Image (cartoon, rainbow, N blue to C red):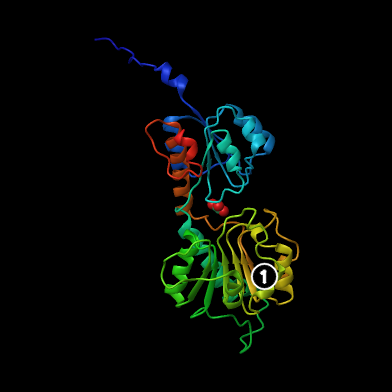
């Protein structure tokens, strides 16, 4: 028998109807592999945020898009996307997306809750530990070889055992941090939230009491019109002089100018910041404050969390665009009910 070429059946029909998905930034492969199975996929593999003009241009033909938190998804962008059915945020926070505008246009908006809770709470804990133990300050001293030698009063920090932790926003991440602080250091947890949460021994209080009583105040609210500059000069002045402020939520929740001043004049003892008002920049002057520990918005930057975020972001797209599949987390499910 002579050699025969194998027959390849080209299902041109399926090829033609594959929906189109665009990813604005490289994300872990796991989600991209899932998307490749179903869609005509384009990934912008650049190590920088997509310029707005490029986003406006690219979005024209796509049915689904995965965005990162610096991609501003407003009505102007959405008006350029006649086929768009889903914006899948590679993040839990979605202040960059005008969700009501998406809803009006029948576009679903997905996010990635749960899977970054552990990572973010661990990061808040890391900031608490480093600012209270002055580890970064000590590290700097050793790097510049300026350690003057052991001293009884040299570089004293704060113990965490039994301290009061005030958590602003007692959702998944806030609760996880509360649990960690309770278990590890027998801390007393008080929190501020719209609703009463029945977890452990934590007690719901008003903001005034939280600020006055806490040794550590940690912020875990989303950014919206109610939370912009939620912590400013007045609130910082209500805090104990020995207290620390930790922000792993969104920069604009804290008035950064007021915080800088509070750090400079000793209104509070220190701060841990993972987020900033005008990212990627931080306010000039913060670099001079020894009592602040800063990280570049990396609270969810673990291999574990980012892989799971990639998977959920892909599942949200598949769930909306492929019949019979279900998305994991959609912020405006009313769009899908139609
Ligand atoms: C990160 O900041 C997120 O919202 O996922």
Q: Residue furthest left?
A: 1
Residue 219: give x, y in percent of width and height.
Answer: 57, 64
Residue 210 appears anywhere in the view: yes
The answer to whether residue 44 is seen in the rendering is no
Q: Position of residue 123 (x, y in %)?
A: 52, 63
Q: Residue at x 61, y 86 (%)?
A: 150
Q: Position of residue 250 (x, y in %)?
A: 61, 57
Q: Residue placed farthest to the top in the image?
A: 2
Residue 133 figure quarter: bottom right
Say which of 306 and 93 sits in front: 93
In the image, residue 249 sits, relative to residue 209, either above or below, namely: above
- From the viewer's perspective, is residue 19 above or below residue 270? above
Viewport quadrant of the N terminus: top left
Placement of 46 over or under 192, stated as above or below: above
x then y, percent, for residue 211: 61, 73
Label 1: few (<14), some or many (≥20) within 10 Å? some
Q: Residue at x 45, y 54 (%)?
A: 114
Mark 1 C-beta closer than 8 Å to ligand 1: no
Quarter of the figure with residue 323: top left
The correct choice, above or below, for 27 with respect to 199 in the image is above
Return the residue nearer the eye: 59 or 155: 59
- Number of callouts in the render? 1
Q: Secondary structure at mark 1?
A: helix
The residue where tag 1 is placed is: 235
């Amino acid at each position: 028998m002579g050699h025969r070429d194998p027959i390849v059946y080209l299902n041109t029909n399926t090829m033609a109807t594959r929906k189109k998905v665009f990813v604005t930034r490289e994300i872990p492969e796991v989600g991209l592999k899932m998307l490749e199975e179903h869609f005509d996929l384009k990934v912008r593999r650049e190590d920088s945020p997509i310029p707005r003009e490029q986003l406006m241009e690219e979005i024209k033909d796509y049915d689904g898009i995965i965005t990162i938190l610096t991609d501003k998804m407003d009505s102007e962008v959405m008006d350029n996307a006649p086929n768009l059915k889903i914006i899948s945020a590679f993040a839990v926070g979605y202040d960059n997306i005008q969700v009501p505008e998406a809803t009006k246009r029948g576009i679903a908006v997905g996010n990635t809750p749960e899977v970054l809770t552990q990572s973010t709470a661990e990061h808040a804990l890391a900031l608490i530990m480093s600012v209270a133990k002055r580890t970064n300050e000590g590290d700097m001293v050793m790097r510049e070889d300026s350690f003057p030698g052991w001293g009884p009063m040299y570089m004293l920090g704060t113990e965490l055992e039994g301290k009061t932790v005030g958590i602003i926003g007692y959702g998944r991440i806030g609760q996880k941090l509360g649990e960690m602080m309770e278990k590890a250091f027998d801390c007393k947890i008080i929190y501020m939230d719209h609703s009463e949460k029945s977890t452990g021994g934590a007690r719901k209080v008003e903001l005034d009491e939280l600020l006055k009583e806490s040794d550590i105040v940690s912020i875990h609210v989303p950014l919206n019109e109610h939370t912009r500059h939620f912590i400013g000069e007045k609130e910082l002045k209500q805090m104990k002089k020995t207290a620390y402020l930790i922000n792993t939520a969104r920069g604009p929740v804290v008035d950064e100018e007021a915080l800088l001043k509070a750090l400079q004049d000793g209104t509070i003892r220190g701060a841990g910041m993972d987020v900033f008002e005008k990212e990627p920049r931080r306010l000039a002057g913060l670099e001079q404050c020894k009592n602040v520990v800063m990280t570049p918005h990396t609270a969810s930057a673990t291999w574990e969390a980012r892989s799971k975020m990639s998977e959920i972001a892909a599942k949200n797209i598949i769930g909306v665009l492929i019949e019979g599949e279900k998305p994991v987390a959609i912020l405006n499910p009313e769009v899908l009910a139609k």
